[in-house]
């Protein structure tokens, strides 16, 4: 009771001191940890074999005492009072020896408890050292032992650090066999795990994940909107192409033409009704406007193309004229620079 009161009082004091930054609690299961340690499991197996042997010895001794009691009971009528007392004293002595042997092997200070304590103590010391290091690295305020006398009515699994302690114990046992590179890798892994156990780090990671999820959702919505617009544009384009094709075919689709041919053949009066202009709907008017705009764009593009072609032709003609003029100037220049030869006839006339 005093132990529980002391623990509760310590919790209260620590809660008051850490109210500003929040309380961090963890727990271990010492029995679970010990079962996971290979050396302890092997030694425990050997100790259990010894205990089994001691139990067998106790059972043999108890059977011998029971046989002595049965023999005394069967022969009691034939024995004298002195022999009966002697045998009863022998039985009592052997019973006392059996009780002493039981206490020696299985008593509170017996061989089983003492050897188990010797076996567990080194591992417990390592566990306590590891827990102190983890508590300092992860800022734990309390670390409880679930297998102790302190009753824990509920303990969330996320606060259980038993597996972490087992991993550190195993690493410490194999540390002499690891290379420096492997030890460095394990230390980096430990540092990362300590960082991940920090609530502030976990909160930052959660915000990053939420932000990433929100960004991906926005991208998906934008892609879906673009796909819907593209599909709508494709459908509208196909509809315009169909209407334009129908207009080129005389303002009727093939179905309408077939229907008109059938109606005109069956009912001559329907011809007059078809020739009567019907008021156009807004959709038809919009389609005509779009067709007109498209035709105007095509006409402008055609005019621009013709202008471009004419400009290129003019440019080519100008370049050709310049080349011809340049060539004529060079020929004229060459002709003027060449001396004119004199003939014998001209010399005679001068004389």
Image: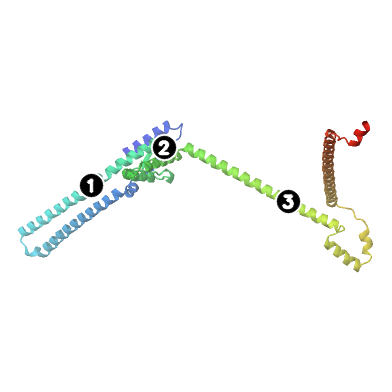
Total numbered labels placed on residues in the image: 3
Q: Which mark is residue 138?
A: 2
Q: CA distance from mark 2 to mark 1?
A: 35 Å
Q: Residue at x 22, y 53 (%)?
A: 50
Vertical relation: 55 (above or below) 346 = below
Q: Which quadrant is the N terminus positioned in? A: top left
Of the image marks 3 and 2, the number of the one nearer the N terminus: 2
**Position in image of residue 351 (x %, y %):** 92, 31
In the picture of the structure, the residue carrying the numbered disc 1 is 115
Badge nearest the viewer, 3 or 1: 3
Report the side of 209 relative to 152 (left or right). right
Badge nearest the viewer, 3 or 2: 3
- The residue most toward the bottom is 266
Of the image marks 3 and 1, the number of the one nearer the N terminus: 1
Front residue of 60/288: it is 288
**Position in image of residue 170 (x %, y %):** 34, 46
């Amino acid at each position: 009771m005093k132990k529980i009161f002391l623990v509760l009082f310590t919790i209260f004091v620590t809660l008051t001191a850490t109210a500003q930054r929040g309380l961090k609690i963890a727990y271990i299961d010492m029995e679970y940890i010990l079962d996971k340690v290979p050396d302890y499991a092997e030694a425990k197996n050997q100790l259990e074999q010894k205990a089994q042997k001691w139990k067998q010895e106790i059972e043999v001794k108890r059977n011998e005492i029971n046989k002595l009691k049965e023999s005394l009971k069967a022969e009691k009528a034939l024995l004298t009072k002195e022999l009966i007392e002697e045998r009863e004293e022998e039985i009592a002595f052997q019973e006392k020896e059996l009780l002493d042997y039981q206490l020696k092997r299985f008593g509170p200070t017996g061989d089983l408890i003492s050897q188990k304590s010797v076996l567990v103590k080194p591992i417990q010391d390592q566990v306590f050292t590891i827990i102190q290091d983890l508590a300092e690295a992860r800022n734990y305020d309390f670390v409880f032992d679930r297998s102790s006398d302190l009753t824990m009515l509920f303990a969330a699994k996320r606060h259980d650090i038993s597996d972490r302690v087992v991993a550190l114990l195993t690493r410490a046992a194999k540390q002499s066999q690891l290379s420096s590179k492997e030890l460095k890798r394990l230390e980096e892994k430990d540092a990362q795990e300590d960082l991940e156990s920090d609530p502030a780090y976990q909160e930052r990671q959660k915000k990053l994940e939420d932000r990433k999820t929100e960004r991906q959702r926005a991208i998906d919505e934008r892609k879906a909107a673009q796909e819907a617009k593209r599909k709508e544009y494709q459908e509208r384009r196909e509809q315009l192409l169909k209407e334009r094709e129908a207009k080129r075919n005389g303002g009727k689709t093939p179905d309408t033409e077939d229907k008109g041919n059938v109606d005109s053949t069956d009912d001559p009066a329907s011809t007059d009704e078809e020739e009567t202009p019907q008021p156009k709907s807004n959709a038809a008017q919009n389609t005509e406007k779009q067709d007109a705009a498209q035709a105007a764009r095509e006409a402008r593009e055609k005019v621009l193309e013709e202008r471009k072609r004419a400009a290129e032709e003019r440019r080519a003609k100008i370049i050709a004229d310049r080349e011809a003029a340049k060539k004529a100037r060079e020929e004229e220049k060459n002709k003027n620079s060449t001396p004119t030869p004199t003939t014998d006839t001209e010399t005679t006339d001068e004389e």
